[in-house]
Image (cartoon, rainbow, N blue to C red):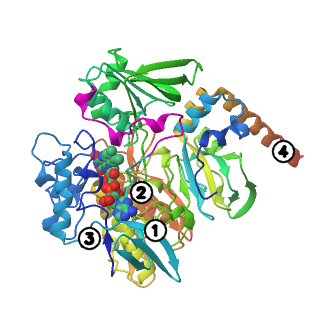
């Protein structure tokens, strides 16, 4: 966890969201995205503040909280920030590193281009969003 | 604070003692600018001078330049840094190499070629200038940017450059009149600074090979992963694969150069728990440039690029260049003094009547805010005893994540449309809010509209 992975492409290949990409495509993604490391308790997304990014968790754990209330935990392979970026609105929750956290980051203004160039990643993201929506609907019912 | 500075070099100058390879910087200094040399406001136009307290040591870069370009030559930059060290009397033990690190109670012990140093706080400003290569079979056998030969020795040869960032394009620019063919390749498309609107991306002065490529003049700029490099007698065979079509392309060339970037020689720090980040494994840092995993270990200089801040709207900091990290360095010194040595200089009081004009003056002219957009901010805070105090220029991220005192941070930001505009972040009762002020075509925010915006943001807080 302490040291950055030697080959980020290998790490990406094990994440569901990138499962359909070929090796050269994975390399292109690995090459174009920035990796970030957050210390425990560091805030990653800030509720109400504009201009955020899309994050994919490579290692570690993050906690979601809104207005001081804990909403859930995210782990390896999970992603966040997409709702705020896609809607062009500030995030509705804080995301905080619950343990040291390593993420890949797609800056907000590049997400659209990123998803358009990688339609198979876009499809995986859509499936994950559908699953989240189904869970929320089920809980509501 | 009692301190010691050591350097493995013979004298001041750091990596500018040998690079950039083609002997001219990519950071400018404008001798003639809207403000007088030596003023704080002038720093916005001079990216290369360091920041002394002594008035006569300011803006030293302009005094070394011969007028042929607003990019100083490498020797001019070296002279600038040497003059700074000599005139300000910075005491450095040169030719002293740090070789290892250990803990001894509450002290750090730095083992060096001249014996051991014991300290409360080590700050590693060892640069990001150690050649780094990705894991590509065969790439270890080709020269790195750092080992490039004189340009004329590439005359009439086919040159394959791995890497499409500034160092790759710098070499390609210098080879244009010599090489028979130039190929620049890496998996993702080249970014140009005029498109990213930041220092991330190939700088305008190195885009000549790109123009040659788009006009089909002979230079090839290729988006492909490099699968392996093979030596075949006098030539190299480079196997590449395009990301979009997965088609293989093989190049036979006389020279291959790995312009694949640089890393930091942080020796045994990872073994002591210092977390690293990114392909080139720079130390992950907090907003105050402390190791994100080992408290008490700090970093200085261009290594600050691994403390990216908020990156609002994707905008990077300029901490990789002198124009950015020179301001971080000042804040870092104050923070170390405060946190570890209990030295906290008096913060001036700002009268209520001056707050609006002071903040608008800062967002219009403060060099720290212009060079480090959405990274550094001017912070004013309500102090129960003294009134409104000026906390100085601080990392914006630390402001947003600390608290709870009522305060405002003024910074500059840029949105994807390219508008540059002031932003005020307020904290009331521990709750943060953001107020974007409008852009101005001349970046002069001292207008009635902006005054009104500041008053609205600060009503009931500081006003
Ligand atoms: C090819 C290239 C071109 C660049 N061009 C520009 C430019 O035009 N403009 C710009 O602003 N920035 C440029 N940069 C970025 C530049 O590196 C920084 O802006 C800045 O000068 C770095 O300063 P520094 O003090 O952090 O590191 P450096 O200048 O690299 O200095 C590091 C120092 O640490 C010493 N050191 C390292 N290891 C040890 C050890 N174990 N023991 C003792 N001492 C040690 C070295 O000897 C050196 O003196 C460029 C970088 C590169 C790689």
Q: Callout 2 environment at 10 Å: few (<14), some (14 to 19), or many (20+)?
A: many
* Number of disc labels: 4
Which of A49/B125 is in front? Answer: B125
Among the two numbered marks 3 and 2 on one chain, the one whose residue lies closer to the N terminus: 3
Circle number at residue B100: 1
Q: Mark 4 points at which residue?
A: A135
Q: Which is in the foreground here, disc 1 or disc 3?
A: 1
Among the two numbered marks 1 and 2 on one chain, the one whose residue lies closer to the N terminus: 1
Asked if marks 1 and 4 fall on the same chain, the answer is: no
Which of B133/B246 is in front? Answer: B133
Please report contact status of discs 4 and 2: CB closer than 8 Å, yes or no: no
Circle number at residue B303: 2
Q: Is residue B370 visible?
A: no
Q: Which is in the foreground here, disc 3 or disc 4?
A: 3
Chain of the residue on which disc 2 is drawn: B
Chain of the residue on which disc 4 is drawn: A
CA distance separating discs 1 and 2:
19 Å
Asked if marks 4 and 2 fall on the same chain, the answer is: no
Q: Name the residue under label 3.
A: B92
Q: What stretch is highlighted in magenta?
A: B132-154
Q: Which is in the foreground here, disc 1 or disc 2?
A: 1
CA distance separating discs 1 and 4:
53 Å
Please report contact status of discs 1 and 3: CB closer than 8 Å, yes or no: no
Among the two numbered marks 1 and 3 on one chain, the one whose residue lies closer to the N terminus: 3
CA distance separating discs 3 and 2:
20 Å
Q: Callout 4 environment at 10 Å: few (<14), some (14 to 19), or many (20+)?
A: few
Instruction: Give the position of the C terminus of chain B as an image quadrant.
Output: bottom left
CA distance separating discs 4 and 2:
44 Å
């Amino acid at each position: 966890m302490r040291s950055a992975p030697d080959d980020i492409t290998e790490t990406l290949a094990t994440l569901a969201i990138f499962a359909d990409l070929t090796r050269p495509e994975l390399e292109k993604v690995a090459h174009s995205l920035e990796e970030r490391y957050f210390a425990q308790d560091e805030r990653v997304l800030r509720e109400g503040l504009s201009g955020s990014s899309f994050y994919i968790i490579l290692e570690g754990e993050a906690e979601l909280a809104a207005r001081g209330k804990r909403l859930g935990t995210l782990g390896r392979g999970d992603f966040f920030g997409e709702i705020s970026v896609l809607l062009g609105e500030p995030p509705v929750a804080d995301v905080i590193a619950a343990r040291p956290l390593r993420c890949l980051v797609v800056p907000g203004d590049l997400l659209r281009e990123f998803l358009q160039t990688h339609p198979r990643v876009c499809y995986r993201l859509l499936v994950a969003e559908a699953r989240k929506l189904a869970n929320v609907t089920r809980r509501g019912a | 604070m009692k301190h010691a500075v050591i350097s493995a070099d013979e004298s001041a100058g750091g990596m500018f003692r040998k690079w950039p390879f083609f002997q001219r910087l990519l950071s400018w200094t404008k001798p003639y600018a809207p403000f007088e040399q030596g003023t704080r406001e002038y720093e916005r136009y001079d990216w290369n001078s360091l920041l002394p307290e002594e008035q006569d040591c300011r803006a030293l870069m302009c005094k070394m330049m011969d007028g042929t370009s607003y990019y100083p030559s490498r020797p001019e930059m070296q002279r600038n840094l040497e003059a700074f060290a000599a005139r300000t009397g910075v005491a450095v033990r040169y030719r002293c190499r740090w070789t290892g690190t250990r803990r001894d109670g509450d002290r750090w012990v730095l083992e060096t070629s001249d014996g051991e140093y014991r300290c409360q706080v080590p700050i590693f400003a060892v640069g990001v200038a150690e050649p780094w290569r990705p894991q590509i079979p065969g790439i270890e056998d080709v020269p790195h940017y750092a080992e490039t030969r004189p340009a004329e020795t590439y005359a009439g040869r086919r040159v394959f450059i791995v890497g499409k960032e500034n160092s790759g394009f710098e070499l390609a620019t210098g080879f244009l009149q010599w090489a028979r063919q130039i190929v620049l390749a890496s998996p993702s498309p080249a970014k140009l600074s005029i498109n990213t609107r930041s220092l991330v991306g190939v700088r305008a002065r190195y885009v000549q090979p790109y123009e040659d490529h788009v006009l089909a003049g002979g230079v090839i700029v290729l988006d492909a992963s490099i699968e392996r490099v093979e030596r075949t007698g006098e030539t190299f065979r480079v196997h590449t694969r395009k990301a979009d079509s997965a088609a293989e392309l093989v190049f036979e060339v006389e020279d291959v150069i790995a312009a694949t970037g640089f890393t930091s020689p942080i020796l045994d720090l990872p073994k002591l728990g210092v977390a690293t980040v990114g392909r080139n494994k720079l130390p992950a840092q907090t907003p105050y440039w402390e190791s994100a995993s080992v408290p008490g270990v700090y970093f200085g200089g261009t290594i600050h690029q691994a403390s990216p801040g908020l990156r609002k709207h994707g905008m990077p900091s300029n901490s990789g260049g002198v124009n950015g990290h020179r301001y971080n360095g000042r804040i870092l010194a104050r923070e170390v003094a405060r946190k570890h040595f209990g030295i906290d200089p008096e913060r001036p009081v700002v009268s209520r009547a001056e707050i609006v004009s002071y903040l608008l003056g800062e967002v219009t002219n403060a060099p720290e805010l212009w060079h480090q957009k959405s990274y550094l901010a001017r912070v004013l805070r309500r102090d129960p005893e003294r009134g409104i105090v000026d906390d100085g220029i601080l990392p914006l991220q630390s402001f947003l994540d600390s608290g709870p005192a009522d305060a405002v941070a003024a910074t500059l930001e840029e949105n994807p449309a390219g508008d540059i505009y002031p932003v005020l972040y307020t904290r009331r009762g521990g709750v943060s809010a953001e107020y974007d002020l409008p852009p101005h075509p001349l970046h002069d925010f001292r207008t009635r509209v902006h005054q009104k915006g500041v008053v609205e943001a600060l009503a009931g807080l500081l006003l």
